[in-house]
C-alpha cells in the first residue's frame, strides 16, 4: 500500500482536514497491484501482527491473494524472525508446543468485520464490498449475518498465513535451527491443524530419531 499510494500526500491531505476518497484509494491500489503483480506484507510482531487489526490492510491482503497474477510475500523483520525461531524450540512450561498454539489462536480469531479503519466511511465501504447487500447495523442479528458473510474472506487470509508459518518452520528445520523435539512437535501441531497428516507424521518420525 505504501508504494501504491503516496502516503506523504495522504498525510498532507489529512493535515488539511481532507482525505482521499475510498473510490480513488481503491482504484489506485488495485491498478498498481495489477501492474506490479507483487505485494509485500510485513508481519510484526510475529505472534500478533498489527496489520491484521487494520481493515485496509486485511482488505489489501485478500486482494493480493485473490488476484490471479499477483504474488503475496509475507515478511518478518530480522528480530521477529529470530523470536519466531526461538519459539519453535522453547516450551511454555506446560506444553512443548510453546507459543505456537497461541499464534494459531490469533489467526483463528481473525475477524475482518472487527478490524479498525481510520475513517468510518472506509470501514463501511470495504465491508459493503465484502458483504454486499447486508445491513451494517449493531443488532445481534445483523452482526451475525455480517460475520457469516465475512467467513470466506477470513478463511482465505487465515489459510495463507498458516501455510506461510508452516513453510517457514519447515525451513528452520532444514537449516538446523529447530533440531529439537519441541520444535518438531510445534510444527507437527501446525500441520495437523492444516489437515496435512502425512507431513505431520514425517516430522514426528524425525523427532523420534533425535
Image: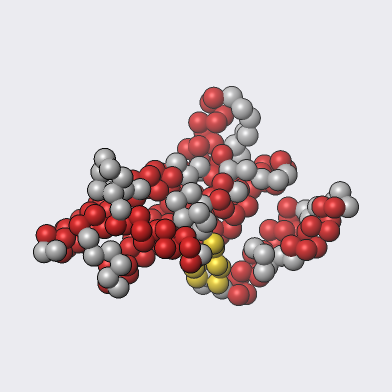
Location of residue 28 by image quarter: bottom right
Viewed as shown, does residue 155 lie left or right of 5? left
Location of residue 185 by image quarter: bottom left
Q: Which one is nearer the viewer's eye here, 134 or 10?
A: 10
Q: Is residue 163 visible?
A: no
Residue 148 location, x and y as percent? 47, 38
Viewed as shown, does residue 173 lie left or right of 129? left
Q: How is the image coloured?
A: secondary structure
Q: Which one is nearer the viewer's eye here, 37 or 52?
A: 52
Q: Residue at point 75% right, 59% down?
A: 24
Residue lying at the far bottom in this picture: please name it: 36
Question: Which quadrant is home to the N terminus?
Answer: bottom right
Viewed as shown, does residue 82 lie left or right of 133? left
Q: Residue at point 27% right, 67% down?
A: 173
Q: Which one is nearer the viewer's eye here, 36 or 73?
A: 73
Q: Residue at point 51% right, 64% down?
A: 77
Residue 73 location, x and y as percent? 49, 68
Q: Is residue 134 above or below residue 3?
A: above
Residue lying at the far left in this picture: please name it: 209
Q: Residue at point 23% right, 65% down?
A: 179
Location of residue 180 by image quarter: bottom left
Amino acid at each position: 500500500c505504501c508504494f501504491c499510494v503516496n502516503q506523504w500526500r495522504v498525510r498532507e491531505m489529512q493535515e488539511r482536514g481532507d482525505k482521499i476518497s475510498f473510490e480513488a484509494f481503491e482504484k489506485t491500489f488495485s491498478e498498481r497491484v495489477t501492474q506490479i503483480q507483487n505485494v509485500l506484507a510485513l508481519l510484526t510482531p510475529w505472534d500478533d501482527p498489527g496489520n491484521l487489526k487494520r481493515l485496509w490492510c486485511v482488505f489489501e491482503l485478500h486482494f493480493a491473494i485473490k488476484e490471479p497474477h499477483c504474488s503475496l510475500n509475507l515478511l518478518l523483520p530480522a528480530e521477529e524472525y529470530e523470536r519466531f525461531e526461538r519459539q519453535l524450540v522453547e516450551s511454555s512450561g506446560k506444553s512443548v508446543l510453546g507459543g505456537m498454539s497461541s499464534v494459531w489462536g490469533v489467526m483463528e480469531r481473525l475477524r475482518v468485520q472487527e478490524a479498525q479503519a481510520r475513517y468510518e466511511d472506509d470501514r463501511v465501504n470495504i465491508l459493503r464490498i465484502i458483504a454486499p447487500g447486508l445491513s451494517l447495523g449493531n443488532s445481534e442479528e445483523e452482526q451475525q449475518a455480517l460475520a457469516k458473510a465475512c467467513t470466506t474472506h477470513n478463511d482465505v487470509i487465515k489459510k495463507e498465513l498458516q501455510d506461510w508459518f508452516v513453510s517457514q518452520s519447515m525451513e528452520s528445520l532444514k537449516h538446523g535451527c529447530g533440531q529439537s523435539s519441541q520444535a518438531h512437535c510445534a510444527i507437527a501441531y501446525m500441520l495437523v491443524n492444516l489437515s496435512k497428516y502425512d507431513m505431520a507424521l514425517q516430522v514426528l518420525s524425525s523427532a523420534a530419531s533425535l
